[in-house]
Image (cartoon, grey):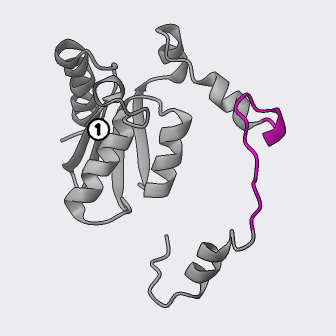
Amino acid sequence: MSDFRFMEKAIEIALQNVLTSNGGPFGAIVVKDGKIIGTGRNEVTASFDPTAHAEVQAIRDACRNINDFQLTDCEIYTSCEPCPMCIGAIYWARPKAVYFACTKQDAAKIGFDDQFIYDQLSLPIENRKILMKQIYIRKGDLPFRTWEKSKNKVEY
């Protein structure tokens, strides 16, 4: 399949999600060696899960299918430029490329505006809309220190 065929597949998933599931207009696929290894569609409202974005769903599906937590040498095709959460998931998954059809500005025009998240991330923690505060307790870093010394850790 060509890049265009893979993008058509991501868009088809998004369209079917709107037509059949009343879901958001987002679809994504993960491709490795010219084969689709994972698919995802926006299931936020269907699953009552704010993290169930198409890209995250596709990453989860692909990782399960290849039994790995990284998507080395994979490509992601998505119907829209990924949001900040999905960008984070994509960087953790480490694919070699991401291709998208619509831009974040296109998404904003239909009510999916994530600019406020970009704005919040650029603020000092004490100025953010949602309270974020460190609570220090003795031994709060014990899990970190234990992991750091562990002989069984799998680094990622």
Q: Which residue is mark 1?
A: 3
- Mainly helix, strand or loop, the magenta region? loop
Looking at the image, residue 68 lies above or below residue 123: below
Q: Residue 94: percent from the left, percent from the top?
A: 45, 57
Q: Quadrant of residue 63?
A: bottom left
Residue at image coords 76%, 36%:
122
Q: Quadrant of residue 147?
A: bottom right
Looking at the image, residue 93 lies above or below residue 139: above
Mark 1, secondary structure of its residue: helix
Of the 4 image quadrants, the one containing the N terminus is: top left
Amino acid type for the residue under numbered disc 1? Asp
Q: Residue 107: percent from the left, percent from the top?
A: 48, 17
Q: Position of 120 compared to 15: left or right?
A: right
Q: Residue 6: say if magenta.
A: no
Mark 1 Cα shell of 10 Å, populated few (<14), some (14-19), many (≥20): few
Q: Residue 129: say if magenta.
A: yes
The answer to whether residue 1 shows anywhere in this view is: yes
Tell how many labels.
1
Residue at image coords 73%, 36%:
131
Q: Residue 68: percent from the left, percent from the top?
A: 31, 66
Residue at image coords 51%, 32%:
83
Q: Position of 81 compared to 145: left or right?
A: left
Q: Residue 126: percent from the left, percent from the top?
A: 83, 38
Looking at the image, residue 29 lies above or below residue 13: below
The answer to whether residue 94 shows anywhere in this view is: no
Looking at the image, residue 92 lies above or below residue 38: below
Q: Position of 61 compared to 109: left or right?
A: left
Q: Nearer the viewer, residue 147 or 85?
A: 147
Residue range (magenta): 123-137
Residue at image coords 64%, 76%:
142
